[in-house]
Amino acid sequence: MGNLVANDGLSGFVILVWLGINGFLFVHFYMAFLVDRWLYTRVLLGHALSWARAPAACLNFNCLLILLPVCRNLLSLLRGSIQCCSRTAARQLDRNLTFHKLVAYMIAFHTAVHIIAHLFNFEFFMDAQLNRSVDLLPFVLSEIGNEDNASFLNPIRSNETSPTIVMFTTIAGLTGVAITLALILIITSSMEVIRRSYFEVFWFTHHLFIIFFIGLVFHGYGRIVRGQTPLSLQSNDPKACADHFRDWGKNESGCAVPVFAGNPPGTWQWVVGPMILYVCERLVRIYRSHQKVVITKVVMHPSKTLELQMKKKGFNMEVGQYVFIQCPSVSRLEWHPFTLTSAPEEDYFSAHIRIVGDWTQALYEACGGDKPEQQEAWKLPKMAIDGPFGTASEDVFRYDVVMLVGAGIGVTPFASILKSVWYKHIQNNQDVFTKKIYFYWLCPETQAFEWFADLLQSLERQMADKDMADFLSYNIYLTRWKETEAAHFRVHHEAENDPITGLKQKTLYGKPNWDNEFTNIAAKHPKSKVGVFLCGPPQLGKSLEKQCLSHSEAEVKFIFNKENF
């Protein structure tokens, strides 16, 4: 139970509060449209009126939230401010994209309810015009406002039109269509298969949020949904006058013809604050992107991984942070995130970029990766850097014991950590609480080990020279292999160094038994707080998080931290 609270307690509380606010807003605004002011509107629309307005209120609230998790500079500022007080609170900021997705799903849900309700509303509006009888209250209400500059209740002013025509000839209709199309494109292009295979599609369609927010702000300006004005309620009490609609306007009836008006647009009041914050965020990014970046070294690793070592005035980083990189000669619009693999103690910052798509391939060629000779410095492309931005890995040195789990290229944040560990011990840094690091690296192919094995070999030698071999325990797993490779491994298995990595620690084959690993660590480090850091696929994350929770009976406490992968 303790591990569950430590790992997910605050996240669960935040989600419950968020759901609670959504529920409160829905119920409150549903009931708000059941009062007398809206009685005549409900004569036309029934409860579809409340079913349209309640999700609209929830949409306003969630659109207020949707931009905040992607204000990276704001989150970095908050993280730096609160991590000194509460690591648990700071760790929640690392789940910003998860919350961003949850809010997006909630927006999609309320949008669907809002649209369905309004489709019924327009059908009811149309039916009121088609059933033309002065003995029917819906028709009488629909006829109000036929005079010039008179207020109306039914936006469909004739039985010769259709809801479709009204939809494309009113502010509410046009903006509603634009909002819906933008939202559909944004959500469908955000699916993982598209995001990973066609990142440019995801990136460009996500910027349709500009159209979404512009349409959202102006959506209510048409005031399509109308209720009785407060002044009209004094001369026409709906409860008393609804049954005497044939005598409206006659002196002896005491019931004047009702006057209707829509609520003033209020969406802008919800979203103007986050929109200003996001504009400031983008201005900061633009300023940073114009600062000069110098590529000091380009390394082409055999596994088709490009290493860029760069310098930038005033650039300060922490372990495990990431930056957004733009190469104007490849694309002036695209920015891509990459984890920093250098240590804060080094006089440069570096990123390892795996060549997997059009943009990375173009960058690879721009840096001379497809040429046999070394690219001259003046021929290297100009780069723009935005960041660095904080991640969960910044907290790695705050734990007594640390488990680092990387999968494939997901090992990059741990390159920075392992380098920094070495520098801190050389410098006898007293701020490091970490006494033991367990490092796990899972790779599907032998080529993936090549660029990182050099760093591990160096650390292995240096730790042995300093008599610190027990400080770092690393386990490298090859999860897939060919028969020819297996034969080679068997022949060289007895060699002093591993045939794949060149390390004294031999490569393991298959996948780790995480239950055994966690049990052994818990037994070796009783009454310790173990930080578990993962950069890998969601399936592995679920498995590790389950292990953190299932070992709650032990005295050791496992704290799960996940990088965005």
Image (cartoon, rainbow, N blue to C red):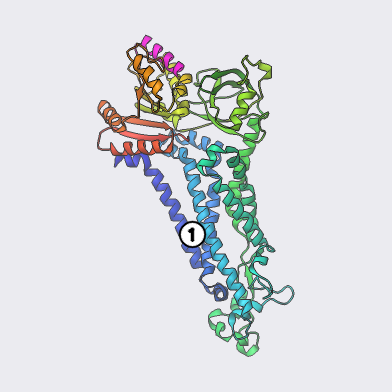
- Find residue 484 and report its horizontal and vertical position in percent: 40, 21
Q: In terms of secondary structure, where does tag 1 sit?
A: helix
Q: Is residue 357 left or right of residue 95?
A: right
Q: What amino acid is found at the position of numbered circle 1 in the picture?
A: Leu
**Overall secondary structure of the magenta section:** helix
Quarter location, residue 135:
bottom right
Instruction: Indicate yes or no whether the magenta region holds residue 460.
Output: yes
Magenta span of residues: 453-467
In this rendered view, identify the residue nearer to me: 172 or 152: 172
Residue sitting at the far bottom: 252
- In percent of width and height, residue 446 lies at 44, 22
Left/right placement of residue 471 relative to residue 388 reads left
Which residue appears farthest toward the top when viewing the image? 465
Describe residue 224's horizontal placement relative to residue 474 as left or right. right
Q: Which residue is mark 1?
A: 25
Provide residue 159's location: percent of width, then percent of height.
67, 76
Locate the N terminus by quadrant.
Answer: top left
Q: Nearer the viewer, residue 32 or 356?
A: 356
What residue is shown at x 36% (from left), y 39% (from top)?
7
Looking at the image, is 438 positioned above or below residue 249?
A: above
